[in-house]
Image (cartoon, helix red, strand yellow):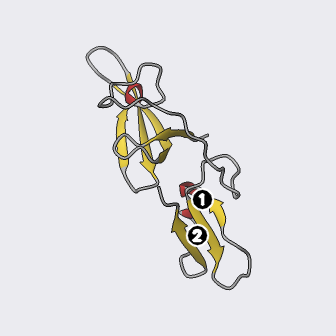
Amino acid sequence: MLTLTSCPECHAPAEITERFTLASTDGPVAHVALSCLAGHHFRMPAGQLPLSPDPPPRRGLAYRPHRFQLCVHCQANPAGFWVSGTASSVTRRPWCLTCCEHLEGTTYHITPFVP
């Protein structure tokens, strides 16, 4: 199950796409890979995520939780893209980054949310 957080660079919604552990001299350290709606990709220690219990200081900005619309396809991940069929009269629907990766660009219009 993917987890919602915010991008360390632009604070846009981001998905944790992978969790893994790397060895260190002090023992194993949990890491995550994340991708945000603006297209940034990071691999970083899990303790540096904005939603961690002790986040690092962020230039005087306080973390504010956000509400996000869920993807209508998987119903689990935060949506970040509007998707509509090219030959359909159906209005656009919110989809997540993971579900959009499997769509063909010739049969669907995919538009990112504007942050």
The location of residue 36, given as percent across then percent down, is: 44, 50
Number of numbered discs overlaid on the protein picture: 2
Q: Residue at x 57, y 76 (%)?
A: 109
Residue 72 placement, left or right of 35: right
Image coords of residue 10 (percent x, y): 37, 47
Kindly identify the residue that appears in the image at 37 percent across and 49 percent down.
41
- Identify the secondary structure beneath mark 1: helix
Q: Residue furthest bottom?
A: 87
Q: Amino acid at mark 2?
A: Leu
Using the image, determine if residue 114 lies above or below residue 28: below
Q: Whole-percent x and y of residue 8?
A: 37, 40
Image coords of residue 87 (percent x, y): 68, 85
Tell me if 21 is positioned left or right of 68 in this view: left
What is the C-alpha distance between the residues marked 2 and 1? Answer: 7 Å
User: Toward which corner of the image does residue 48 lie, by quadrant?
Assistant: top left
Q: Amino acid at mark 1?
A: Cys
Q: Is residue 40 above or below residue 113?
A: above
Quadrant for the N terminus in the image: top right
- Which residue does the numbered mark 2 point to in the structure image? 103
Q: Residue at x 36, y 44 (%)?
A: 42
Q: Nearer the viewer, residue 44 or 29?
A: 44
Q: Which mark is residue 15?
A: none
Q: Are marks 2 and 1 in contact (CB under 8 Å)?
A: yes
Residue where numbered disc 1 is placed: 99
The answer to which quarter of the image holds residue 38 is: bottom left
| Residue ID at (56%, 62%) | 81
